[in-house]
Image: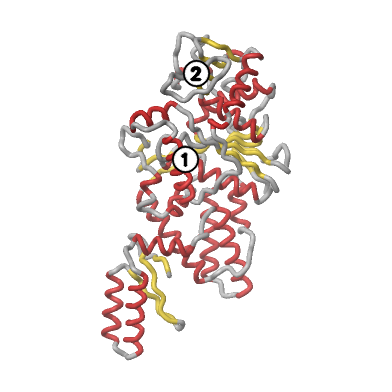
Amino acid sequence: MTLQLYNTLTRSKQSFEPLDPDRVTMYACGPTVYNYAHIGNARPAVVFDLLYRLLKTRYPNVVYARNITDVDDKINAAAAEQGLEIGVIPRRFTEAYHADMAALGVGRPTIEPRATEHIGEIVAMIERLIAAGHAYEAERHVLFDVDTFDSYGRLSGRDRREMIAGARVEVAPYKRNPGDFVLWKPSDDSQPGWDSPWGRGRPGWHIECSAMSAAHLGEVIDIHAGGQDLVFPHHENEIAQSCCAHGTKLFARYWLHNGFVTVEKRKMSKSLGNTLVVHELLRHWPGEAMRYLLLSAHYRQPLDWSESALRQAVTTLDRLYRVLEDHPAEQAAKPAATVVEALDDDLNTPAALAALNALARELGQCEDPAQHARLAGELRASGELLGLLQQPAQWTEQRQAEAGLDPDHIDRLVAQRTEARQQRNFAEADRLRDELDEMGVELEDSAEGTRWRVKARESGQATET
């Protein structure tokens, strides 16, 4: 099966055919680093990390750029509020973003361009737009004239007046019409700024992505990805300025957008006080369980985040890791065809996770040695493709720490119980088992000895050690 992707631009599912199979290009809008990332920010990072993994199984060279927006009015406001030098804020929260995403199993992109490192390319692109009659200077601002681009509105599929009425656009007297957007704006002494033909200033948000994408991926790219909230105005504006600057009919050939995250069926917002920050969640929950939950709904659909769903993800991963420990993969293998087929269908992660769990059940019931080796290899390889099941020791240690257990102390109690059983002191052995049970430890006796596991959170399932 060929990879099928839903293209927002055509509003249809299409077979993915790159411009150049020897160099596949993908750009995803990254964070504006003024604060910690919340789970809504984490969803595209996880989803498009998975797409990058999938593409790499097919193509020899996939160039994935995910930018860092490190010049923005939100950064300036955060610095002023905290009484810090402006540069401190993007450095601090870029580091935090990297750490938090790594905990969710998100790998680094091929390229991670930063807006402040591409001012030259941004200025050059604006100059081209002015020269071609698509942009104009007004009161030390440079603005894009949306009336000069006939296809404006094609991505979002709405009438321009409707889009402007429904979006937050800056109304200013120097604009030719309300939909015109800023490419360059002036900076005062308290704000970051660079010299330009229009005076000291800084770039608008939209032009940054266009310039960085062109610099690293080319004028026309294969895939552009981001959250649903970016369709308008950000991605619509990227298309307009990129096509007009380069004289192309397309900017990106496939546009992918992930749906929103809700919390307990409610929209996540500061006003409701339910904004869930990844940095804080990681203090209480395993990052791998958070990744599992973020993949549990189809990326184009809304995802509802809840503690009960997160607990279930922990329980499921406990079971999967236990199967892997009971049936280790002794040789490299390819992911299961059922998992790959699900992902090929527009990243159908619910079906892929169902296939992963079905594979684990089949492995747990398998008695044929040859079949066992194949299934074990496929389970680990399938987990690797999904960004799961790669850290059994870390998972076990984290679960033990969450339960407040000292493994050395547990080992001593288990050894004492084993000695009591050998001496046929069954009353003492039962007492020790009860003590371990009260501590949240479950025992499994076999001919090879006794193995202990941490009981899963609010579940009869458990993680073995």
Around disc 2, counting alpha carbons within 10 Å, would you say few (fewer than 14), some (14 to 19), or many (20 or more)? Answer: many
Residue 279 location, x and y as percent? 39, 46
- For badge 1, the amino acid type reads Thr
Q: Residue furthest bottom?
A: 423
Residue 173 in the figure: left or right of residue 155: left
- Above/below status of 214 relative to 178: below
Quarter of the picture containing the C terminus is bottom left
**Point 35% across, 60% down: residue:** 402
Residue 118 location, x and y as percent? 58, 30
Task: Say what secondary structure mark 1 lies in.
Answer: helix
Along the line of sight, which residue is nearer the eye, 68 or 383? 68
Residue 231 in the figure: left or right of residue 217: left
Residue 100 location, x and y as percent? 44, 47
Along the line of sight, which residue is nearer the eye, 402 or 273? 402
- Above/below status of 51 relative to 391: above
Q: Quadrant of residue 134?
A: top right
**Point 33% across, 73% down: residue:** 409
Task: Say what secondary structure mark 2 lies in.
Answer: strand
Visual colour scheme:
secondary structure
**Point 51% across, 18% down: residue:** 200
Q: Which residue is mark 2?
A: 185
Whether residue 183 can be seen here: no
Whether residue 246 can be seen here: yes
Along the line of sight, which residue is nearer the eye, 82 or 128? 82
Mark 2 → mark 1, Cα distance in angstroms: 24 Å
- For badge 2, the amino acid type reads Lys
Q: Which residue is mark 1?
A: 94
